[in-house]
Image: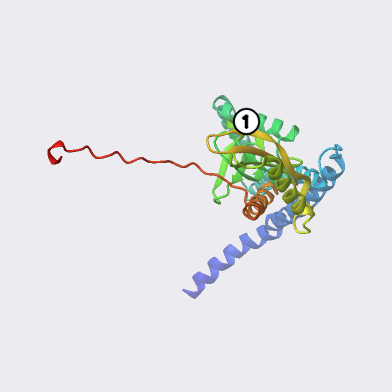
Amino acid sequence: MQEIVTKYADKYAELIIPWLLTSGLQIIIIIIGALILNKIISSFIEKAVRIAVRPDGISSKEAEEKRENTLIQIFNTTAKISLLTITGLMVLQEFGVEIAPILAAAGIVGLAFGFGGQYLIRDIISGLFIILENQYRIGDVVNFDNAGGTVEEISLRKTTLRDIDGTVHHIPHGEIKKVSNLSKDYSRVNLDMGVGYSSNLEHVIEVINNVGNEIAADPKWKQYIIATPQFLRVNDFADSAIMLKILGETLPHRQWEVTGELRKRLKIAFDKEGIEIPFPQMVMHKAKEPVNNSEI
């Protein structure tokens, strides 16, 4: 029994050891070379994009950096897929697999997909225009027709969003008909406040502007504010309130925080100044009971 085991061990050793010293070594070299090449390509792409993308004089430094990071991610993903495909074919060839039939089969499959892959082609073409036109970048907050959230990833085929609930949405580019970017270059404080009809408007406007100036001078908040929130106009005569429009500008993504703080400070200031913030009220009248003539 021992002799049989030794015989087979020697036989397989004669086959495996030469293979390890030839094809096995080649596979290791191919994999190491691919990893090194991936590092070089990634570094080259990053440097090339940083050099190629020029400031347009309008976008902030942060916005330009977002655009660069988006392009770097897309080019890196494309390069990695191509490199992985080539490396896989070279490794298969070292295992003795004929890659010519695989390439021919891939061509036939690609042709078959070409007839039914119009949606994929549409997604890729739409993705190219989104990237070239710089409609949005990784980190922007956007609204599409059927979803909204922070852009986490952009590829040629789809965009990945994460909404405020933490839900991740994968949207093919061909399905996007309208894009609303809520954080490109700058954002706005756009607040409607209602005050009672008996309020002194000049006094109310003065209080609103003072609160806006205070928050813009606060060391915690002034770094986020581009234009101080101020009274803009009387926006509407509603059923129970005069609606006032307050407008300001903030850095991208900061409009919600600044607006929330502004609401809080306005409520405190209105309470202190005795300014009424009305709310809809309903007056109910109780019907009188009919008089019973028999009791008279």
Residue at the spot 70% in from the left edge and 46% down from the top edge: 208
Location of the C terminus by quadrant is top left
Residue marked by disc 1 = 178
Image quadrant where residue 101 sits: top right
Residue at the spot 83% in from the left edge and 46% down from the top edge: 61
Which residue appears farthest toward the top when viewing the image? 115
Q: Is residue 213 above or below residue 110?
A: below
**x, y (%) of residue 211?**
72, 51
Could you tell me how many numbered marks the image carries?
Answer: 1
- Please indicate, yes or no, whether residue 98 appears anywhere in the rendered image: no
Which residue appears farthest toward the front when viewing the image? 296
Image quadrant where residue 295 sits: top left
Which residue appears farthest toward the left when viewing the image? 294
Q: Identify which amino acid the numbered label 1 is placed on.
A: Lys
Q: Is residue 111 above or below residue 219?
A: above
**x, y (%) of residue 125?**
67, 29
**x, y (%) of residue 164?**
58, 49
Q: Nearer the viewer, residue 212 or 139?
A: 212
- Please indicate, yes or no, whether residue 56 appears anywhere in the rendered image: yes
What is the crowding at mark 1: few (fewer than 14 residues within 10 Å), some, or many (at least 20)? few
Q: Is residue 27 above or below residue 281?
A: below
Q: Nearer the viewer, residue 96 or 120?
A: 120
**x, y (%) of residue 282?**
43, 41
Which residue appears farthest toward the bottom when viewing the image? 2
Q: In the rendered view, does 192 fall on the left or right side of 51? A: left
What sort of colour scheme is used for the picture?
A: rainbow
Q: Nearer the viewer, residue 212 or 17?
A: 212
Q: Secondary structure at mark 1?
A: loop
